[in-house]
Amino acid sequence: MCGRFTQRYTWAEVHAFLSVIGAPKNLRPRYNIAPTTEVDVVVDRGQGREVLSMRWGLVPVWWKKALKDVPSTFNARAETVSDKPMFRDAFRKRRCVIPASGFFEWTDAAGGKQPHYFSAADGAILAFAGLWDRWTDPASGEERLSCTIIVSGANDWMAPYHDRMPVLLAERDIDAWLAGEAGTEVLRPAEEATLRQWTVSRRVNRPGADDDDPVLIEPVEAEPPAAARLL
């Protein structure tokens, strides 16, 4: 599962990593992104890769009810993403990459849940495999873009913290993924040397305007994980 993550890169870094086009944008760093908020997403609609802002929580194009009635679609399981009605059309037609600086998971600890921060071992941007869609609100006529992050089973290194993890696309697979040429074979757990982790402040547990600053991802002292929280 991936229910909270960070995006704290510059336009130049995203451009160098994913070859996005368009005029440079001021990308606001975010340190505690929660579902249903807006996130940066990289898509290729036939004229080059671009960075768009989308709701995190996919709303399929065919959805006829109100936005508040959409179930939790911020994650899609790799094992079923090509078949589930909520995701299968986007899987066939609308792939994306969601750039990330890191993500959070929690373990049980004295006094409550202890957040851990996971980032690339070399400090690089992570490429989450994702899907996106375009939906029109039947009541207002407003168009909304939305996305989901695909998750796989955890690798052995990640398993003590959670039984799921976001799919981190290998650089060699990004082109084929965005073009719709790659299938579920690329939606596999990351190699164990890909990530590093450290414990962070429990302020992460309270997403909101007052809990979105660089201090959230600074290392703090904590006991080793006693038991993984499996969601």
Image (spheres, helix red, strand yellow):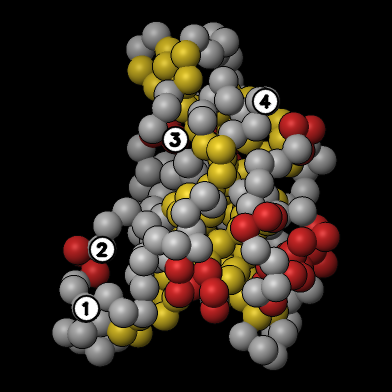
Which quadrant of the figure contains the C terminus?
Answer: top left
Q: CA distance from mark 1 to mark 3?
A: 34 Å
Looking at the image, which residue is at 82% across and 60% down? 172
Foreground pick, 119 / 189: 189
Residue pointed to by mark 3? 204
Label of residue 157 in the image: 4
Could you tell me residue 208's position as x and y percent? Answer: 36, 47
Could you tell me residue 193's position as x and y percent? Answer: 79, 33
Foreground pick, 69 / 181: 181
Q: Amino acid at mark 4?
A: Trp
Residue pointed to by mark 2? 70
31 over 87 or under it: above or below: above
Of helix, strand and loop, which one carries label 4?
A: loop
Relative to 141, is 85 on the left or the right?
Answer: right
Of helix, strand and loop, which one carries label 3?
A: helix
Counting residues from the start of the chain, the first of labels 3 and 2 encountered is: 2
- Asked whether residue 25 appears in the rendered view, the answer is no
Of helix, strand and loop, which one carries label 2?
A: loop
Choose mark 1 or mark 3, whichever is in front: 1
Counting residues from the start of the chain, the first of labels 4 and 3 encountered is: 4
153 over 174 or under it: above or below: above
Of helix, strand and loop, which one carries label 1?
A: loop
- Asked whether residue 106 appears in the rendered view, the answer is yes
Residue pointed to by mark 1? 64
Looking at the image, which residue is at 58% across and 71% down? 95
Counting residues from the start of the chain, the first of labels 1 and 4 encountered is: 1
- The reply to whether the C-beta atoms of the residues labelled 4 and 3 are less than 8 Å apart is no
Q: CA distance from mark 1 to mark 2?
A: 10 Å
Counting residues from the start of the chain, the first of labels 2 and 4 encountered is: 2
